Image: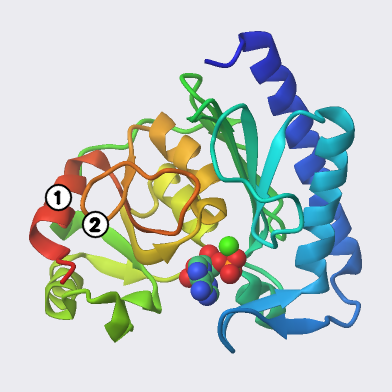
Amino acid sequence: MMEQTMKHTLYQQAQQWILEAGRLIKEKMDEPLEIMTKSSPKDLVTKMDKAVETFFLTKIGETYPSHKVLGEEGIGKAVSETKGTVWIIDPIDGTMNFVHQKSNFAISIGIVHEGVAEIGFVYNVMEDTLYHAMRNEGAYKGKRKLPMLPEKTLDQSIIELNHFWLCPNRRVNEEKLQQLVYRAMGTRAYGSAALELAFLAEGITDAYLTFSLQPWDYAGGFVILREVGGKLTDAIGEPVDFLNRTTVVAANSSIHQELIDDYIELK
Ligand code: 2AM
Ligand code: CA
């Protein structure tokens, strides 16, 4: 377990850096973007993603040389285990939104210590809204403490989905997901996993399903969601490991198991 004073110091420090990184992004927002693609033509990265990741790597390296950094752009050293303290960082989550909308993207940071997710941040840069949490100390949106999530049924739920469930190679039973879409009160797709998890923690949505996420997409949101009683597992209900790509079912606890049992079938 992380020592209390250390945890609070890290929290303050990370908060300061995340706001600074947000200012950096806003300042350079209107400069021409160099857009490149990664795993597919739809998987974008810009020099801003890289610059923000480098910003955190430099700050963390100077201040906490023993800490490890697992970042989306893979600029730092490879991380293969969650021993010690690991910062899991997505410099810009929702890169497509960043490029095409200049809004609806976030900086996400999760800090894992000896395998336990202790600290989480999701910063909605353009809205200037910071979601943040420490384990066992509650979750906040800015200065406002977020209440525990209320009981919900599926019929009353707004479900966040992304397009990855349409990929045939994921071997997801799409008919069942279709049934879920009809059953739910509504669906949404915001295009930033970190923001989707923050909205879920805020209680303005009730579940988020996706069949391909990386640790940096969910680590920050995981801590925030857990503090309001929400649950995030993989698609068969097993814990996520903060190291590997995974399916994700994040939800209000009252519907989490039902989603897995009745609507998610991996073939
Ligand atoms: P990114 O914007 O940092 O790439 C899109 O619905 C969400 O899924 C975003 O948070 C996006 O993160 C994430 N994502 C995960 N894997 C992805 C992939 N292969 N291509 C695009 N987005 C991906
Ligand atoms: Ca991401």
Q: Residue furthest bottom?
A: 41
**Above or below 117: residue 25:** below
Residue 2, picture quadrant: top right
Q: Position of residue 135 (x, y in %)?
A: 49, 24
- Secondary-structure class at tag 1: loop
Q: Residue at x 13, y 68 (%)?
A: 183
Name the amino acid, label 1: Thr
- Secondary-structure class at tag 2: loop
Res 255 visible: no
Q: Residue at x 72, y 60 (%)?
A: 126
For the C terminus, the image quarter is bottom left
Tally the marks. Answer: 2
Q: Position of residue 111 (x, y in %)?
A: 60, 34
Q: Which residue is mark 2?
A: 157
Tag 1 near tag 2, CB within 8 Å: yes
Determine whether the beta carbon of the residue marked 2 sits less than 8 angstroms from the nearest atom of ligand 1.
Answer: no
**Mark seen at residue 125:** none
Name the amino acid, label 2: Ser
Q: Which residue is mark 1?
A: 153
**Above or below 2: residue 99:** below
